[in-house]
Amino acid sequence: MDKKVKVGIVGASGYSGEELVRLLLSHPHVELTAVTSRQYAGQTLAQVFPKFGHLPQSKQLRFTEPNSELLAKQAQLIFLALPHGVSAEYAVPLLQLGCQVIDLSADFRLKSAEIYKEFYAHDHPAPELLATSVYGLPEVYRSAIKKATLIASPGCYPTSVLLPTLPLLRAGIIKHTGIIADSMSGVSGAGRKAEVDYLFVECNESVRPYGIPKHRHLSEIEQELSVAASTPVVIQFTPHLIPINRGILTTLYLAPEKHFSTVAEAEELNRQITACYQAAYANEPFVRILEGKALPDTKNVTGTNVIEIAWRLDHRTGRLIVMSAEDNIVKGASGQAVQSMNIMCGFPETAGLL
């Protein structure tokens, strides 16, 4: 039996941290050796998360205060499930101590410190690392992820926008202008925190937009779309909070490069879109392209690392409507981070995720 890779989680008590715990405790090729939380320091995993109590390791592994030097001795790969601005404080020393780091915050997703400051309202804490970090979208940057020591795992909304859109932009099927994205997210996307806006009574029986007109995730969405289009891309993005625990549904309104007014033109465009998605994702284990009348549905992806994608042509408006559904905590956060870890470590990409 191959020796298992030792991994740790900084910030293991939040929703993304808890999901990482779940995935890593049952992962066949890793050993979870460190979990940190200032709030729960000294308590076992089983005490904080009783759902894992049937696993022997959960009764032995205790939460500790985060300490970079100690973490580097306990694990060779560290997940940072921390807020933006805080992750960098740990990423810098951990990298210096020889660890591989997968950061679930926004600290290393952007290549421009100026854009980071524009969207996150403070100076970047470690701008020298932006050039070396790899954006952890496995279906797009797999080869770079293999050689990386610092992974910036994408945000949940960006994943739901980028995976459906990037292949179409690269293939020249859609225009890079006039892109509109509407997304709806479950309440877990706000993180595990006690704020009035996220209390049950405030969220239940309620749907509301927020972060308008400049949600923070726009920065990485537009960065990656601009790379694909080889020209600056600006989009309209409106997120909404919906009363479910987890899941994101995104609807994209796109302008095809070729006008379609006849049935034959529409059929040809549909063939091009189908071929484009097949070329991009036919061999991807976690991208499900829907056929026939099927449309994305969060109930079909909750608890999985899968994103569903479907599209329709609108003859009246001349637009292409593309839809996606994912679990914001798995494919939109922790599952995607584990997928990147599998690539980095040379494990089967689906290990611990099926």
Image (tube, rainbow, N blue to C red):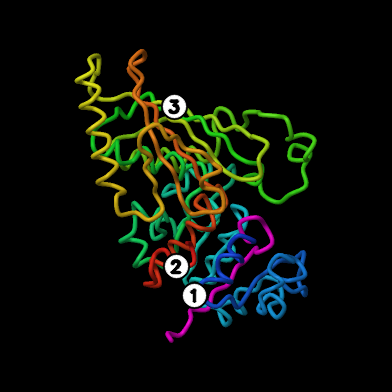
Examine the rendered structure and indicate whether residue 102 appears above or below residue 72.
Answer: above
Q: In the rendered structure, which amino acid carries the disc numbered 1?
A: Pro
Q: Nearer the viewer, residue 194 or 311?
A: 311
Would you identify the image quadrant in which residue 351 lies?
Answer: bottom left
Secondary structure, mark 2, is: loop
What is the x, y in percent for residue 40? 76, 67
Q: Residue at x 34, y 67 (%)?
A: 147
Magenta stretch: includes residue 128: no
Distance (Cα) linking label 3 and label 1: 41 Å
Secondary structure beneath dot 1 equals: loop
Q: Is residue 11 magenta?
A: yes
Residue 79 in the image: state x and y as whole percent.
55, 65
CB of mark 2 within 8 Å of CB of mark 1? yes
The mark nearer the N terminus, 2 or 1, is 1
Amino acid type, callout 2: Ala
Q: Which mark is residue 28?
A: 1
Would you say 252 lies left or right of 183 here? left
Please state, as top left, top right, bottom left or bottom right, where the N terminus lies in the image: bottom left
Figure check: 41 above or below 119: below
Front of the two marks 3 and 1: 1
Residue 177: image x %, image y %?
A: 34, 26
Point 47% across, 48% down: residue: 113
Q: Nearer the viewer, residue 289 or 61?
A: 289
For marks 2 and 1, give the CA distance: 7 Å
Residue wearing tag 2: 351
Residues drawn in magenta: 1-17
Residue type beneath disc 3 = Ile
* Residue corresponding to mark 3: 180
